Image (cartoon, helix red, strand yellow):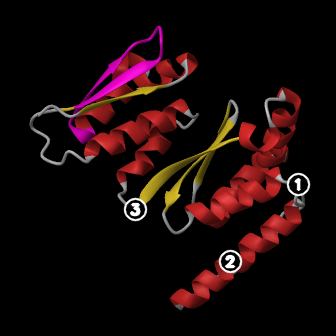
Amino acid sequence: MEQKTYIKIPQDRVGVLIGPHGQSKKRIEATLLVDLTVDGESGNVEVKVLPEQTDVSVIFTAKNMVKAIGRGFSPQRAMALMNEDNDLLVIDLEDYVGTSKNAQARIKGRLIGKEGKSRELIEELTECLVSIYGGTVALIGSFEMLPVAKEAVEMLINGAFHKTVWNHLYAYRRRLKKEKGELWYEPKRRRE
């Protein structure tokens, strides 16, 4: 039986999914042994498992990779989903601040931070990749760290001070490293 699924991505992300000379699309297809049929007009993508692929679960990996690219990740960063311990989580800002573009822009500014420092620090402390695109925040990370990254993002969305969020993440990292019996030194804190 033929395994296939469909996903829709924003039209302005279709070119990123395909890549220069079709390289990004070809790389996903060759790596996962799937076929991607992309409709450039609508943004609809059909993901079909090729007959030589014995693991039909790759359809979910391919779908998540396409979705991640649609949510602002580069194809290279979306490849992190090849690791079976990683998953994709998408947070819709409308659920928190409604449809107001001004409120969404303010929240996105808080999440990105000055010169991208907030996003960078969330990535560093949670070991999750973060993409802020359109009205969403997308996270790629391990099942263990995704809830931590989501909590940090939600704290910032709900108006917590950056320093409060960073202290929370540093404390979590110390606790995690202690549980694993590893030593971890806090990097010098950045001023926000």
User: Which SS class for mark 3?
Assistant: loop
Labelled pair 1, 2 in contact (Cβ < 8 Å): no
**What range of the chain is rendered magenta?**
31-48
* Residue shown at 47% from the left, 35% from the top: 67
Identified by mark 1, the residue type is Gly
Label 1 or label 2, whichever lies nearer to me, is 1
Look at the image and tell me in which quarter the C terminus lies: bottom right
In this orientation, does residue 88 appear? Answer: yes
Mark seen at residue 159: 1
Residue 190 sits in quarter: bottom right
Quickly name the residue at label 3. 85
* Residue shown at 42% from the left, 19% from the top: 44
Q: Is 68 on the left-hand or right-hand side of 97?
A: left
Q: Crowding at label 1, few (<14), some or many (≥20) Cα neighbours within 10 Å?
A: few
Identified by mark 2, the residue type is Tyr
Q: From the viewer's perspective, is residue 64 above or below residue 142?
A: above
User: Which SS class for mark 2?
Assistant: helix
